[in-house]
Amino acid sequence: MHPKNISIQEYTYQLPEEKIALHPLEQRDASKLLVFKDGAITTSQYNQLAQFLPEKSFLVFNNTKVINARILFTKPTGGIIELFLLEPYGADYTATLTATNECKWKCLIGGASKWKSGRLQKTIHHNQTLSASLVEKLTDAYVVQLSWDGFISFAEVLEDSGNIPLPPYIKRNADEADKERYQTIYAQHNGSVAAPTAGLHFTPAVFDSLYAKNISADFVTLHVGAGTFKPVKAATMLDHEMHAEWIDVDAAFIENLLLHLDDTVVAVGTTSLRTMESLYWMGVKALLQPELTSLTISQWEVYDVLQHNTVTAKDALAALLQWLKKNNQDRLFTQTQILIAPGYHFRIAKAIITNFHQPQSTLLLLVAAAVGDDWKKIYGYALENDFRFLSYGDGSLLFI
């Protein structure tokens, strides 16, 4: 079946509220780990992860860093307006976060009906002022210009005046602990408005146990957008628009991945998996159309245009490296809108480490693409055996 014809109603299950983890465990790697391999399910903990991976494994992590993407303004009348920063508008992340006077963001606005015009202001960092002005109404968001006094960067503005953007299903205000626990310990590049949650369970001790078994690791960057929480409301996937996200991968990673293609390549999180599979398809495009000056992946082109090619992963990644060299680039910074759903054939990843996802979500479709109808058995087992669900919950190691 073409994924366009998938009925999202077939990918649902009953998720009781009490199964949703509202807080992380005190110890990251004490989270439960469900291991699914060859049809069998095993229960363990993340601190035992290494024993379930072959020695020749290659783990790929997403080192994006969550920004304080929620900014609250109080109107003179006392009303609260919340800006949820989605992504920079008209500039890239580096330019926007290092800006020292003003920048534009695509935003969701809580209380938008109360803000028709005029500037919002709040006091920040050493009595300076942060101002917000409406620029444009988009189909699904707003463009807002933010400006501030002084010469601090916008990254510093967010650090001082923004709030951690906990997911909508964690129905509480963010607290001090979330500043640390809603980040991976290896978070490095600012840009996400949601954490790559599979990585939240990793500790220095877990990394030590992996390296002691000669298991390799490397990092990509995919800035997770709020679209990761976007519910599928359409009856079939044909009418659902998949969210696009920014990936940032350097040539050295692609070279390293190329060297490990014969190993068990494990994506730590759906974002790492989307990135690696997108790299394959970008390599296919670079091989088939070397004249292209930019490489992106749209929602359906994998299935409608590229799916039936016979390009190997090795040839695709080699072509991608050649394309970067030809275009005098040492890194690939672009967007992917890839939708991985049942019917997708994985080209690079052989396993995925991931949390338990919401019913009727594109993330659950990705899991079903990896394990087939066994997703029902896996999720049923997790519910019956007191696994904690969603962002602060437990996780799984699923062999594809």
Image (cartoon, rainbow, N blue to C red):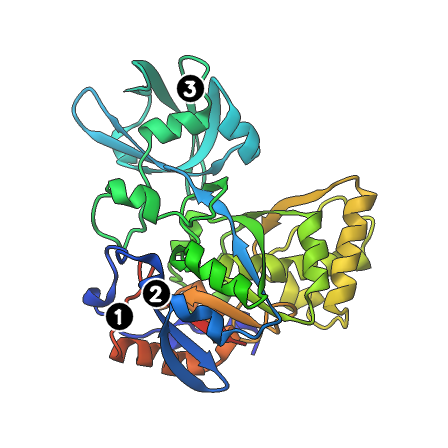
Front-most of 263 and 337? 263
Residue type (three-letter) at the residue carrying disc 2: Gln
* Residues tagged 3 and 2 counted as in contact (Cβ below 8 A): no
* Neighbours of disc 1 within 10 Å: few (<14), some (14-19), many (20+): some
Q: Earlier in the sequence, mark 3 or mark 1?
A: 1
Residue at the (34%, 65%) spot, across then down: 358
Front-most of 72 and 265? 265
Quadrant of the snapshot with the N terminus: bottom right
Whether residue 240 is visible here, answered yes or no, is no
Residue type (three-letter) at the residue carrying disc 3: Ser
Q: Secondary structure at mark 2?
A: loop
Residue that numbered label 2 is attached to: 358
Residue at the (49%, 80%) spot, across then down: 372
Q: Secondary structure at mark 1?
A: loop
* Residues tagged 3 and 1 counted as in contact (Cβ below 8 A): no
Q: CA distance from mark 3 to mark 2?
A: 37 Å
Quadrant of the snapshot with the C terminus: bottom right
Q: Residue 143 at what x, y percent from top left?
A: 44, 32
Front-most of 109 and 34? 34
Residue at the (19%, 66%) spot, across then down: 18
- For residue 15, the mark is 1
Q: Earlier in the sequence, mark 1 or mark 2?
A: 1
Q: Residue 217 at what x, y percent from top left?
A: 58, 58
Q: Residue 336 at what x, y percent from top left?
A: 59, 53
